[in-house]
Image: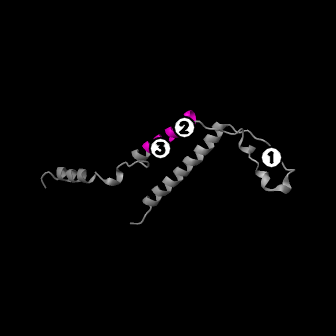
C-alpha cells in the first residue's frame, strides 16, 4: 500500500514508550532527604551535644551478678569512639539495605 513504511514506523514509535523501561529509583528523594536530616542531626548532637561518657564500655561490672565468680576478671579493652560509631552505623545501614532490598524483590517477584 501507499506509505506502508511510514504507517508501520508511526505505530512502532507509539509502542516503544513502555512503562517497563522507565527508571524508578530504589530509594525515593523523600527517603534520601529523611536520611540526610537524620544523619546530620546525629552528627550535630555528637559534636555539639553535652554527652557524658565513661572511660570504657568494659568498666561496667557485669560479674557483680554472679558472686561466686569474684576471682574472674575481664581485661579492660579500650575501643575508640570512632570505631564504635562506625560499627553501629555500618550495622544500622546494613539493616536498612536488607529491609529495602527485601521489599524491592518482594514487589518485583509478586504474582499479580
67 relative to 107 in the view: left or right: right
- Separation (CA) of disc 2 from disc 1: 32 Å
Question: Which-is-in-front pick, marks 2 and 3?
Answer: 2
Q: Is residue 50 magenta?
A: no
Give the percent coordinates (x, y) of residue 24: 38, 49
29 relative to 43 in the view: left or right: left
Span highlighted in magenta in the image: 33-48
Q: Residues within 10 Å of mark 3 (few under 14, many from 20)?
A: few
- Indicate the quadrant containing the N terminus: top left, top right, bottom left or bottom right: bottom left
- SS class, disc 1: loop
Query: Mark 2 — residue?
Result: 45
Query: Mark 3 — residue?
Result: 35
Query: Mark 1 — residue?
Result: 74
Question: Which residue does the image show at 57% across and 37% down from the upper left?
Answer: 46
Q: Earlier in the sequence, mark 2 or mark 1?
A: 2
- Indicate the quadrant containing the C terminus: top left, top right, bottom left or bottom right: bottom left
Give the percent coordinates (x, y) of residue 90: 59, 45
Q: Earlier in the sequence, mark 3 or mark 1?
A: 3
Amino acid at each position: 500500500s501507499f506509505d506502508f513504511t511510514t504507517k508501520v514506523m508511526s505505530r512502532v514509535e507509539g509502542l516503544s514508550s513502555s512503562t517497563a523501561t522507565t527508571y524508578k529509583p530504589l530509594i525515593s528523594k523523600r527517603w534520601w532527604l529523611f536520611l540526610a536530616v537524620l544523619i546530620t542531626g546525629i552528627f550535630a548532637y555528637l559534636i555539639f551535644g553535652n554527652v557524658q561518657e565513661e572511660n570504657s564500655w568494659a568498666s561496667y561490672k557485669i560479674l557483680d551478678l554472679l558472686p561466686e565468680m569474684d576471682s574472674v576478671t575481664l581485661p579492660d579493652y579500650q575501643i575508640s569512639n570512632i570505631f564504635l560509631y562506625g560499627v553501629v552505623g555500618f550495622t544500622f545501614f546494613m539493616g536498612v539495605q536488607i529491609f529495602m532490598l527485601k521489599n524491592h524483590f518482594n514487589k518485583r517477584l509478586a504474582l499479580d
